[in-house]
Amino acid sequence: MSIDNPKYQKMLVDLLAVCRRNLPKVNEDLVTKAFEFALEAHKHDLRASGEPYFSHPYEVALIVAEEFPLDDITVVSTLLHDVVEDTDFDLSLLVKEFGKEVAEIVDGVTKISGIFKGHDITKAENYRKMLLSIVKDVMVIIVKFADRLHNMRTLEFVIPDKQRRIAQETLEIYAPFANRFGLARVKWELEDLSFRYIYADAYRKIARLLDGKRLERDLFISRVTDELTRSL
C-alpha cells in the first residue's frame, strides 16, 4: 500500500477536511505523518471483512474527528491506536516519531484492550472499575469508545460466536461505562448494536413492530439492559 495510491490520497484529503471543519486547530503535517505511518504499519493486515486493516484505524479516526472532536493529538493517536498491539512497531518508536503525549494515549488504549483478552466477563462491575483505574487521560477512553463503536458497526463480518462475545462485553462493560462518562448517545448505540447480536430474533421483531420509533425501542432495550446489569 502506498500513499501515492489515489484511494489513500482521497482518504487523507477527506480526513483532513473533517479535522479542519471540526477541530479548533489542526497540525496537518502531523496528521498526515500518522496516516502514512499507520498505513505502512498495517500494510500486510486484513480485517475479517477482507478489507485492508488500515480501514479500521482510519474509520475510527473519522469517528473521533466528527463525533468526539477534541484536538488533532487525539486524531493522531487514533490512527496509531493498534500499532503497538498488532504490529512490530513499539512504543519507544511512537515517542520518537510523535511525542510522549501520543505514545501515552496509544499505551492506554493498548492496556484497555489487554484487560479483556483471554477472560470471560463474569463480574462486569469489576472490569468497569479496572477501566476507571487505568484511564489517566480522557482522550484514552474517547479513542476506545470510537474503536468499539466502529467494531460494533462492522460486527457482521465476525463469526457468530465472536459476535455474541463482543456484543455481551459491549453491553455489560462499554455501554454502562459510556453512560458514566455522560455519553448518552454512545451508550444508546452500543446497547442497540449489542442487542442486535445477543437477541437477534427479538431485535428483528422489535424493529418491525416499532418501525423506526427509536424512542420506544431505546426504552425497551435500556430496560432489558438494566435488568441484566442488576442480575450480575
Image (spheres, rainbow, N blue to C red):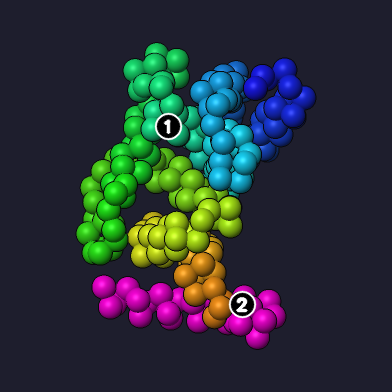
Tell me, for residue 22, which label it has, or none.
none
Residue 132 coordinates in the image, percent (x, y): 27, 51
Q: Looking at this view, is 66 or 87 the one in front?
A: 87
Quadrant position of residue 127? bottom left
In depth, the one of 226 and 54 nearer the eye is 54
Residue matched to label 2: 204
Above or below residue 194? Residue 79 is above
How many labels, in total? 2
For the C terminus, the image quarter is bottom left
Q: Position of residue 61 (x, y in %)?
A: 56, 38
Amino acid on which disc 1 is placed: Asp
Which image quadrant is residue 230 in?
Answer: bottom left
Q: Position of residue 51 (x, y in %)?
A: 63, 39
Residue 220 among those drawn in magenta: yes
**Stretch of the chain drawn in magenta:** 204-232
Residue at x-position 45% and y-position 34%: 81
Q: Residues within 10 Å of mark 1 (few under 14, many from 20)?
A: few
Residue 32 in the image: above or below residue 82: above
Determine the residue positioned at 47% across, 51% down: 148
**Visible residue check, residue 156:** yes
**What is the quadrant of the N terminus in the image?**
top right
Task: Please name the residue shown 61% across and 34% down the image.
Answer: 52
Secondary structure of the residue carrying numbered label 2: helix
**Is residue 31 at all visible to an observer of this figure?**
no
What is the CA distance from the residue labelled 1 to the residue labelled 2?
35 Å
In the rendered image, the residue lying farthest to the top is: 96
Question: Viewed as shown, does residue 107 lie left or right of 204?
Answer: left
Q: Viewed as shown, does residue 192 lie left or right of 97?
A: right
Mark 1, residue position: 86
